[in-house]
Amino acid sequence: MDDLDLIAAYARRLEAALRRAGRPVQPLVDETTAHLVEDAARIARADGCSAQDAARRAIARFGDVPAVVAAARKNGRALSASIARVSSLVLLACVAWWIFTALVDPPYPLQVKDALIVNFFAELAFVSILLFRALDGRRTLRGVVGPALVLNGALAFALVVVGLVSGGVVERASGHGTPLSSLLADPVWALMLVQSIAGLRALGGTRTRDGALVAG
Amino acid sequence: MKGHLDALLLSSLARGPRHGYAINEWLETRSDGELKLAAGTLYPALHRLEEDGLVRAAWQDPPGERRRRVYSLTKKGERALAAQKDEWVAFSRVMNAVLGGAHG
């Protein structure tokens, strides 16, 4: 086995391990190969060792496959962050639509309760923007996004429970459907709950996303 | 040094675009060999910075040379680096004051 075979074998092991871990294979595998080939050539030139020894030393310096996969996992965007971002975007779109229909093009004369509902939706939009920005690394807002999500989640949880209970009463009275029908008809509370839980988990996870660094 | 990888990587690109190998080399040289970064952890961190919009990357295929993926700072990355530098200066000032005071 020559130096390029050793590096190719390492790249294949890395590719298989990344696939098993559900992490993207490219561009990491191609960059790894290019890095190892360059490092092996420099080691061979500097120390005058055989190409095979140089390749072995380059691979050892790069790190073993489990360590690289662990770094890829640690640095990958967490599933909870993706869920939180998507639910925030969907909620923002819903809020924009409701505000438009309630204020700009109301199907009926505007009443006080409509203004209160718009106020609530504006608060929900604010929380969604806060969360989206915080997950995007805007540090100035991180202090307030946690408490805002806890309040948002508590309100959403209460509304989901009330929706299920009152929906159950209505459905029993009408004799058809299930309590879940009320949630499916108006999924915003459940979506808010998902946004809050996923957002809090994602914000917790971003504190430990740094790659490993060794000071020698 | 854990927790400061982003600042180090962004700082290495503040002087111009570099590929991963050159970034690793620059960090080692710049720190007089004190900072030894396992290269296998460097690339995933660079990919995260790319995903966050702090750096951009493009494959370059110069004639007669090996194909490389070159990273450069974005405007957002420049702002993030400036913020992390300010934070580090404030932190080190506090640490110097406290640790220096222990001998005073």
Image: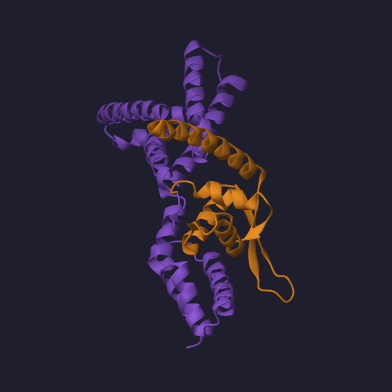
x and y percent of residue A41 in the render?
Answer: 58, 77
x and y percent of residue B61 in the render?
Answer: 70, 70
Pick the quarter of the image with the C terminus of chain A.
bottom left
- Front residue of A179/B103: it is B103
Q: Residue furthest right?
A: B63
> Would you place residue A205 above or below residue A183 in this image?
below
Q: Quadrant of residue A65?
A: bottom left
Residue drawn at x 47%, y 50% is A77
> Is residue A165 rendered to the left or right of residue B35?
left
Res. A187 in view: no
Chain A appears in which tint? purple
Q: Which chain is orange?
A: B
- Front residue of A181/A28: it is A28
Res. A102 in view: yes
Residue drawn at x 53%, y 35% is B87
Residue drawn at x 56%, y 60% is B24
x and y percent of residue B101 in the render?
Answer: 41, 30
Q: Residue furthest bottom?
A: A1
> Would you place residue B69 above or below residue A74 in this image?
below
- Front residue of B30/A12: it is B30
Q: Quadrant of residue B85?
A: top right
Q: Residue furthest front?
A: B104
Figure label count: 0
> Is residue B44 rendered to the left or right of residue A170?
right
> Would you place residue A191 above or below residue A216 in this image?
above
Visual colour scheme: by chain
x and y percent of residue A17 in the render?
Answer: 40, 69
